Image (cartoon, rainbow, N blue to C red):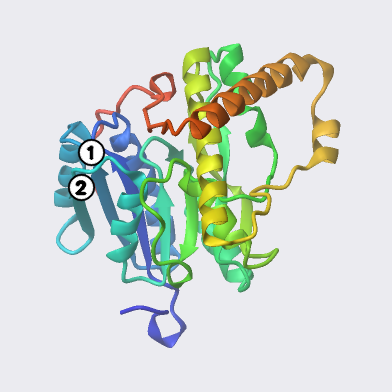
């Protein structure tokens, strides 16, 4: 069943959602993905859903099974893992995929209706690309200064896989190490090493997300990120793989885009990053592992609208 559909038809696509069992926003994500999937179907793609809830039983597990029931037989697979590990969920979803393309989407974001079509069109136009990644658009309605500072980097293209939404050629990668804190950075390092065109940024594909709104949550988010980078660095050192920068920095774009009014946001962003990096390095040297914890202030109110694949 792997590979392109015969007679030149559009590739089949699996939409895969790794989801913590206590995630409150899964229904809203599934509603948005359902609409986006319809656009893919109209383009000729056969679309399947696959959800992997991970962690002790929580409300998202029931939401996932309800969605699968509404989608009809054979359209949606649901896997339940007791292990709270996004990389393990990723591996389960990838291992169960039988389509040539797989879309990974976080369970707390909302893709625009044409996001998946934009990713598909971009992937078709670039046969050298192995992954096409969407642009993040922050929800800044009533946002705090912290949220605006946290969202600042997403205005720029760093040439990385943006974890909330990306389309991957299924054959490009079969597994990732479990226990990763920053699986999208690991993907960026692994896939980016295949060549300059391997990671394709598609800015017409938009996925909406809510940044951390409190300083404590933003720091915890950055501590996890910096610890994840150290984890990847140490893993590549153990494997004898050259350590190269995960991302590229568009300095000219920074200077052209950021005006004096945003300098306080830049200072806050850099300050939190520097402190988080220092703390992460100290903890790593002392052998203290940073665990994954949800960033509560980034969670929107859960949707009450029933989901289902049309």
Q: Is residue 11 above or below residue 231?
A: below
Is residue 114 visible in the rendered structure shown here?
no
Percent coordinates x, y for residue 164 in the rendering = 47, 43
Mark 1 = which residue?
Answer: 55
State the residue at coordinates (41%, 53%): 104
**Callout 1 secondary element:** loop
Name the residue: 33% across, 35% down.
Answer: 28
Residue closest to the far bottom: 7
Q: Is residue 282 left or right of residue 5?
A: right
Residue beneath label 2, please?
81
What is the x, y in percent for residue 61? 18, 40
The residue located at (55%, 60%) in the rendering is 190
**How far apart are the alpha carbons under marks 1 and 2?**
6 Å
Q: Are marks 1 and 2 in contact (CB under 8 Å)?
A: yes
Q: In the picture provided, is 173 more to the left or to the right than 240?
A: left
Mark found first going from the N terminus, 1 or 2: 1
Instruction: Answer with the quarter of the image where residue 41 lies.
Output: bottom left
> In front: 255, or 248?
248
Q: Toward which corner of the image does residue 137 lie, by quadrant?
A: top right
């Amino acid at each position: 069943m792997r590979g392109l559909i015969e007679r030149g038809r559009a590739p089949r696509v699996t939409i895969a959602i790794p989801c913590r069992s206590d995630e409150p926003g899964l229904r809203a994500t599934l509603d948005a993905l359902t609409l986006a999937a319809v656009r893919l179907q109209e383009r000729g793609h056969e679309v399947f859903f696959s959800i992997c809830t991970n962690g002790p039983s929580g409300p998202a597990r029931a939401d996932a099974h309800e969605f699968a029931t509404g989608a009809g037989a054979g359209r949606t697979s649901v896997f339940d893992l007791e292990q709270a590990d996004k990389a393990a969920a990723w591996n389960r979803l990838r291992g169960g995929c039988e389509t040539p393309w797989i879309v990974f989407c976080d369970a707390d974001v909302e893709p625009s209706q044409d996001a998946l079509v934009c990713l598909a069109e971009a992937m078709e136009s670039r046969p050298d690309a192995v992954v096409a990644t969407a642009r993040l658009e922050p929800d800044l309605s009533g946002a705090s200064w912290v949220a605006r500072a946290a969202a600042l980097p997403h205005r720029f293209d760093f040439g990385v896989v943006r974890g909330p939404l990306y389309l991957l050629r299924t054959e490009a990668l079969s597994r990732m190490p479990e226990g990763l804190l920053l699986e999208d950075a690991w993907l960026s390092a692994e896939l980016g090493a295949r060549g300059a065109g391997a990671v394709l940024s598609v800015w017409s594909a938009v996925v909406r997300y809510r940044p951390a709104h409190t300083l404590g949550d933003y720091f915890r988010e950055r501590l996890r990120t910096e610890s994840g980078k150290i984890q990847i660095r140490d893993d590549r050192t153990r494997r004898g793989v050259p350590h190269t920068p995960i991302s590229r920095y568009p300095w000219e774009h920074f200077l052209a885009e950021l005006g004096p009014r945003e300098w306080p946001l830049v200072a806050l962003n850099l300050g939190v990053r520097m402190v988080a990096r220092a703390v992460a390095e100290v903890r790593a040297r002392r052998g203290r592992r940073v665990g994954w914890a949800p960033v509560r202030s980034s969670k929107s109110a859960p949707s009450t609208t029933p989901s289902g694949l049309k």
